[in-house]
Image: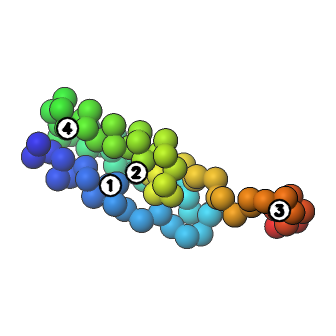
Amino acid sequence: MYCLQWLIPVLLMPKPLNPAFIYNHAMFVVLYLTGFFLVRKPCTICSLVFLAAVFLICYNCVGNCILWQCPSDECEGADCESTCQAG
């Protein structure tokens, strides 16, 4: 489980607030993880634990998914159609 100390901070890395940089952030994370898995070769258990954590965070869409932008829940209600389409 020594290799998890290099993977857990990736889950805690904040996403940029500017939507223009989300693609760059996702590419950085993917390249970092690819390099990490090729150079460090973490054990199977650490890899599975990390991939399960990434899957659960992105599946629940808590808002800190490192690979894609989760849809916002700003529009809920009857009259949100006009406000969401206008904005």
Measuring from the top left, give residue 54's x and y in whole percent.
Answer: 38, 43
Q: Distance between the residues labelled 2 and 1?
A: 7 Å
Q: Which amino acid does label 3 sit on?
A: Cys
Give the residue drawn at x 34%, y 49%: 32
* SS at badge 2: helix
Q: How far apart are marks 3 and 1 (CA)?
A: 35 Å
Q: Distance between the residues labelled 1 and 4?
A: 14 Å
Whether label 3 touches label 1, CB < 8 Å: no
| Residue designated by label 2 | 29
How is colour applied across the structure in the image?
rainbow
* SS at badge 4: helix
| Residue designated by label 3 | 80
* SS at badge 3: helix
Measuring from the top left, give residue 9's x and y in whole percent.
Answer: 27, 58
Mark 3 burial class by Cα count in 10 Å: few <14, some 14-19, many 20+: few
> Does label 3 or label 2 sit earlier along the sequence?
2
**Image quadrant in which the C terminus is located:** bottom right
Measuring from the top left, give residue 39's x and y in whole percent.
Answer: 21, 40
User: Measured along the vertical axis of the image, is residue 44 above or below residue 37?
Assistant: above
> Does label 2 or label 1 sit earlier along the sequence?
1
Q: How far apart are marks 3 and 4 (CA)?
A: 43 Å
> Does label 3 or label 1 sit earlier along the sequence?
1
Q: Which amino acid does label 4 sit on?
A: Cys
Whether label 3 touches label 4, CB < 8 Å: no
Query: Of the residues tagged 3 and 1, which is closer to the observer?
Result: 3
Q: Which mark is residue 46?
A: 4
**Image quadrant in which the N terminus is located:** top left
| Residue designated by label 1 | 10
Q: Distance between the residues labelled 4 and 2?
A: 17 Å
Whether label 2 touches label 1, CB < 8 Å: yes
